[in-house]
Amino acid sequence: MKRKLLPLALSLALLAGCAPAPGPSPSPTAEATPSPTPTPAAAVDFHAFLDEVNETRRAVIEDGPSLDITAWTPDFTDQNHTFTDEEMEVLLTPHDPAENLTLEQAREDVETAFTLLRTTYGAYEYFGGDEVFDGLREDALARLEEADPALPLADAVADALYAVLSPVVRDGHFVVDNRHLIEPYELSPYYVPGVYIDDPTGLDEDYIKPTIGPDGAITYGFYALSRDGSDLPDTVGEYDGLNWTQCKPVRTLSGTAFSEGQCQGIPMLESHRMYAERSGEEEQLEWFASCGGEYAGAPLLIFDVRGNPGGSDRWFMSWFEGWTGQPAQPRQAFGQRYSQLRRQNSTLSYPEEWMGTWGVSSSGGDWVEREGYTFLLTDGGTASSGETVVEHLHSVENTLVVGAPSGGCALVPNNMHLYLPNTGVELYFGTGLCFHDTMENRDGIGYLPDLWVPPVEAPVAVARMCEYYGLEG
């Protein structure tokens, strides 16, 4: 067999320095005992690999078909007076269920939930409009009638809404009472630890991906997406007894929103979130927004958005313009629904005359030429505005994404919290609709990396790759 295995001791040593402390490393398969001095798999030429990535992305931006969302963004001025001011105040304010809640009040809340979707949800038409959602409403009402009488009515409403919406609404942001609708669509990355492949020819591409070997060379390994790993094969080609292990995201407990550092001499920017959560983080984000020019000429740069759940795009947008000298302009189609409830929300308000319309824009994108090499680190915790970084750096020459697929939470932006009037059940969904590069909905799957690496190993893997190929200079 052509297996190349990385010993446990070497694996742990490579993680020292700039990566978070790893958890226990998976043991190699019983039949594949690691050699004390493994021979790395045959190296892929770095510049040939990078040129192919560049050309693929450039072609999408400069030659791809136009992105058009107009079929899903009709005017809706007939909905402008659906709710009274008093009703909107209740819908926007957290509250407990009504005392002595009745089944009739629970039914009213199911009806209200679907009225909210029809009047406010950005992907309502995208997921089928009235033709689909009217049937889901009837199904939810039927489920409510059949609910266990011992179950609190508020829970029965939440369960009914989740049950009917989750098979249809593939939206990484959408939450019903702390349950994410994306759950049925979520795929996680798995890999086979310690196995590197000289020649992937003839092996199923669903299971073979480019990676960084123990010596820093670009090579190939076993990586795949799966719901729970149970469908992954024990044998691929001549490789058998495959020990598939989940590639878990990095769980950061950082007290910083943004920080600067380095990994083995390479400048490294760590963006943990795009919002201020603790004292001093607003200042960190302000510095993030302003420091792009400091790295404009960096020959090597690691940009780490592992575990970044999002926030506001504006910090990164400012950084990008300082870094590249031009505004970020990916290939995208974007729509924003100017609804009655969105206007009532103080953080999302707009002029009254816009109400009942969509603001829609579409751009072909700009390919940004750049000499230096940028390595973007992602994992399953990279979502929302964290994925904005991925979308925009896809437009910059000489950028490689390293790690695991992002979280897949990008289709519907500008999200808001709403609360059903009688039960207090919380709905969290967005008022926009957005596509990047293509018209594919990536929610639940995310953006795939160029080089698949267990996320905890990503910074040091990049560092040893730079050393292997002599990229430091």
Image: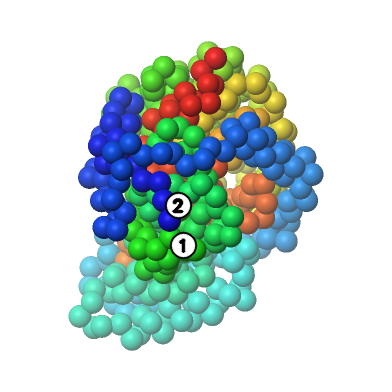
Per the image, the residue denoted by label 1 is: 238
**Element type where label 1 sits in the image:** loop
- Which image quadrant is residue 254 in? top left
Q: Are marks 1 and 2 in contact (CB under 8 Å)?
A: yes
Q: Position of residue 156 (x, y in %)?
A: 31, 74
Instruction: State the residue in front, 203 or 26.
Output: 203
Identify the residue at image location x=38%, y=82%: 143
Horizontal arrangement in the rendering, residue 393 relative to residue 2 (left or right): right
Q: Position of residue 411 (x, y in %)?
A: 56, 53
Horizontal arrangement in the rendering, residue 148 relative to residue 324 (left or right): left
Q: Is residue 311 above or below residue 123?
A: above
Identify the residue at image location x=32%, y=31%: 14
Direction left: furthest residue: 150
Instruction: State the residue in front, 261 or 132.
Output: 261
Instruction: State the residue in front, 205 or 340.
Output: 205
In which quadrant will I find the C terminus? Answer: top right
Which amino acid lies under the numbered mark 1 shown in the image of this protein? Glu
In which quadrant will I find the N terminus? Answer: bottom left
Per the image, the residue denoted by label 2 is: 2
**Element type where label 2 sits in the image:** loop
Q: Is residue 388 above or below residue 81?
A: above
- Which image quadrant is residue 229 in? bottom left
- Which image quadrant is residue 425 in? bottom left
Q: Is residue 220 above or below residue 293?
A: below
Identify the residue at image location x=57%, y=25%: 373
Q: Position of residue 213 (x, y in %)?
A: 44, 39
> Is residue 301 visible from the viewing direction of this image?
yes
Q: CA distance from mark 1 to mark 2?
A: 8 Å
Horizontal arrangement in the rendering, residue 204 relative to residue 76 (left or right): left
Which amino acid lies under the numbered mark 2 shown in the image of this protein? Lys
Q: Residues within 10 Å of mark 2 (few under 14, many from 20)?
A: few
Identify the residue at image location x=55%, y=73%: 133
